Image (cartoon, rainbow, N blue to C red):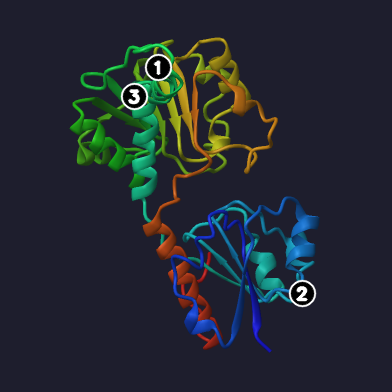
Amino acid sequence: MRLRCAVLDDYQDAATALADWSPLADDVEVVPFRTHLDGEDALAAALADFDIVVTLRERVPFRGSLLARLPRLKLLIASGMRNSVIDYAAAEAHGVTVCGTASSSTPPVELTWALLLGLARGIVEENDALRSGGPWQSTVGADLHGRRLGLLGLGRIGSRVAQIGLAFGMHVSAWSSHLTKERADEVGVELAPSKEELLATADFVSVHLALGERTRGLLGPAELALLKPTAYLVNTSRAAIVDQDALLAALREGRIAGAGIDVFDIEPLPADHPVRTAPRLLATPHLGYVSQANYRTYYGQTVENIQAYLAGAPLRRLP
């Protein structure tokens, strides 16, 4: 009897379109889930008859309580090689092998700049006005050349965002709790003396930090209050790094010029979520990793991981 493989959150029907699953045809039945399963009870009921589960990024928490309700599950595959919502100890205790895939930093870099440029030049407002017969030229764009880009984080993604900022002729500074002058010099940017200094002086702030105990809630009401009223904030990293209520208040009250957000406290967003109606906000539904090349990598390597598991030699094991 063939094993059953669930592919979660395949909203665009991309898993089977962008990878060749035929090598598994004799051994595995692949079942894409095109809508999100919300809550442990729904997950436990839907996944009870599956031997393999493929989960996209960190959208679905696999805690010990859920794993205990999935006695048939033997292989869990996550996109990317880091996942903070999988209980690895519980997986091991329940006999579940956990594997990952490679993931490119290029798509989130590109989306960061799509959001930043969209904000700076009022792209959405101007497009809407043009298509609806509204006013001609209703906004005045914010220049990039000569302005200051402040980066929270200068890792794989932050450093590439920095290079593009430099190419635009921006002054780029960066800060994180462990960032050194040597690393900043290597990338060609200034080391901000403090987080507070970076926030107070930047015209554009972009978040590129991993979520952890030091970064959760890093930008709260006090930090957001340091931003200039003409400043823009972009977050394509993790929602919990920025206090969402404080950000929404700053946008509603006009205390910052705008924000570009790709990550949220709840995903997918409920229809009545306040983010959907917030002013001065350019928001995308967590598209940072969503690109054809990344999906080909995720699902292509997922097929390889399943083949290797069936052969008794699992690849790319996590953590």
Separation (CA) of disc 2 from disc 3: 52 Å
Please state the horizontal and vertical placement of residue 66, each as a whole percent of the image.
75, 61
What percent of the width, then of the height, locates residue 84? 58, 53
Q: Distance between the residues labelled 2 and 1?
A: 51 Å
Q: Is residue 234 above or below residue 310?
A: above
Residue under pointer 2: 71
Q: Name the residue under label 1.
A: 231
Q: Is mark 1 on a helix, strand or loop?
A: loop
User: Where residue 43 is drawn, which disc sits there?
Assistant: none
Q: Nearer the viewer, mark 2 or mark 3?
A: 2
Point 32% across, 16% down: residue: 141
Q: Where is residue 157 in the image (x, y as percent from the top left)?
A: 35, 44
The three-letter code of the residue at mark 2 reads Pro
The total number of labels drawn is 3
Residue contact between numbered discs 2 and 1, judged by CB atoms under 8 Å:
no
Q: Give the image quarter of residue 110.
A: top left
Taking the spot 47% from the left edge, 24% from the top edge, the residue there is 259
Position of residue 202 in the picture relative to residue 55 (left or right):
left
**Neighbour tally class for label 2: few under 14, some 14-19, many 20 plus, Cα within 10 Å:** some
In this rendering, the answer to whether 104 lies above or below 125 is below
| Residue sitting at x 60%, y 81% | 28
Q: Can residue 181 be seen in this view?
A: no
Of helix, strand and loop, which one carries label 2? loop
Residue type indicated by callout 3: Pro
Which residue does the numbered mark 3 point to in the structure image? 193
Q: Do we see residue 48 in this rendering?
A: yes
Q: Which amino acid does label 1 sit on?
A: Ala
Considering only vertical position in the picture, is 235 above or below 19? above
Which residue corresponds to the image point at 52% horizontal and 37% vertical from the top-left? 215
